[in-house]
Image: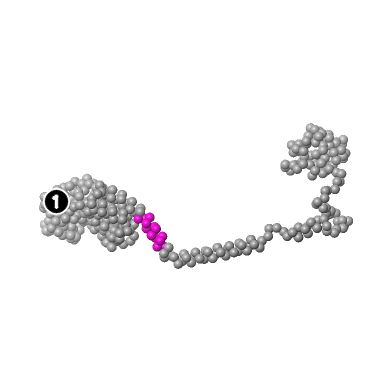
Amino acid sequence: MTTGAAARIPYELLGTLAETPELSVYAARKPDSDELLLLNRIPHAPETRVFFRDLYFYSAHRPERSEFVELYSADRDFYAVFRYHQAPSLASLYGSCPGPARRRLSVLIAALFHVYTETLRMPLPVVCSALQPDNILMDDDGEIRLFYQLRSDFVTGPCDLWAEAAALIRFMLARELHSGRHQALDDICKKCRAGLYPSLPALISDLEKALDTLSQAEFLNRARAFVQRKKARLLQMSWLGLVAMACMLVIYLVTELTRSDTLPVAAISDIGNVTYVASQDESDSDLQLNDPSQPLPDTGEPAFSQLPVPTSELTSEDYVVQSGDSLNSICTEKYGAAAYAAPVASFNGIGEDQPLEAGSVIRLPLRDQLAAYIE
């Protein structure tokens, strides 16, 4: 660029990035700013006039496109100004296909989506240029940006969008496509190169499906690799587990075989002998041992135990006998019927006709409970 031409542009040129007859790329900035800008100069020609007219129309009506600054002409040259991002490009980050395939495929999907949204209404040469690995930048936080450095052959001649998209896929996934183990990715690349996709979103959708499949395959591969690395350790732990289970089984069997849940027959016989046969001087003790096989002796006195077995334990209240009271009168007053005298006498361990001494206390069961014993 001549000094006179440089003086007529409102930017300070800091250095030349590319110099060809069709396109010159400079690093520039405004005199009153430290912001680094990208200045593209294309010499005036009939075909470039139409191209930059369309570029200006689309860019000027997209104020949210922060990368584009302005488009103007000076002397017989056209100039397009873009903000220059110094983040590393995909060409420098993934030239040798480092890292897992899933990571590179995720970056590829993000890059294609960014190119699609940022160049949706831009001319085809701009879209083809944006698909170059050198022009796709990625910040430290993973954000994708575009460099907007136009390819001169795209400006002066036709470009194939799908051929450039397929070239970007081959660049990012060269290792997988050459291995022959990822048929889905290879089919997508061939379909893209043949131009069979109607739009970039359709291509992105197929790549996202391949990403899901690749994620599942990588999980299985990582699990298989982990087992191979830890095979000896896992085998040792398995043997230790089997030995521990065998020891526990032996302990259980020994415990079960040596345990007895019943007493010996001789002990039961001895207990019976103590109850009935053992010699004892009954005059020396109040304890009377009876043969359980013989009926209880008849004492002539009723016992409450001779009543039918109640469904629940009887509860009672105390009653102080008054002068002239009998069981019949007391039951008539308390229960409303003299028929309760027999079970009340049995409950207190006395005879039904036995006179009651004034001032003594007898127990009277509740009527609802005592009624169960009246036939």
Quadrant for residue 339, please give it: top right
Numbered disc 1: secondary structure: helix
Residue 104 or residue 44, whichever sits in front: 104
Q: Residue farthest to the top?
A: 336
Q: Give the residue drawn at x 26%, y 57%.
A: 170
Q: Amino acid at mark 1?
A: Thr
Say which quadrant the C terminus sits in.
top right
Is residue 145 visible in the rendered image? The answer is no
Residue 321 in magenta? no
Examine the rendered structure and indicate whether residue 72 appears above or below residue 315: below
Say which quadrant the N terminus sits in.
bottom left
Quadrant for residue 99, please give it: bottom left
Q: Which x, y percent locates residue 200? A: 26, 49
Q: Which x, y percent locates residue 250? A: 59, 64
Residue 87 or residue 165, whichever sits in front: 165
Is residue 209 visible in the rendered image? The answer is yes
Examine the rendered structure and indicate whether residue 271 appears above or below residue 117: below
Q: Give the residue drawn at x 38%, y 60%.
A: 221
Q: Which residue is mark 1?
A: 48
The reply, left or right, for residue 142 in relation to residue 322 is left
The reply, left or right, for residue 43 in relation to residue 231 is left
Residue 225 in magenta? yes
Q: Which residues are magenta?
A: 214-226
Marks counted in the figure total 1
Q: Which x, y percent locates residue 249? A: 58, 62
Q: Give the residue drawn at x 12%, y 56%.
A: 5
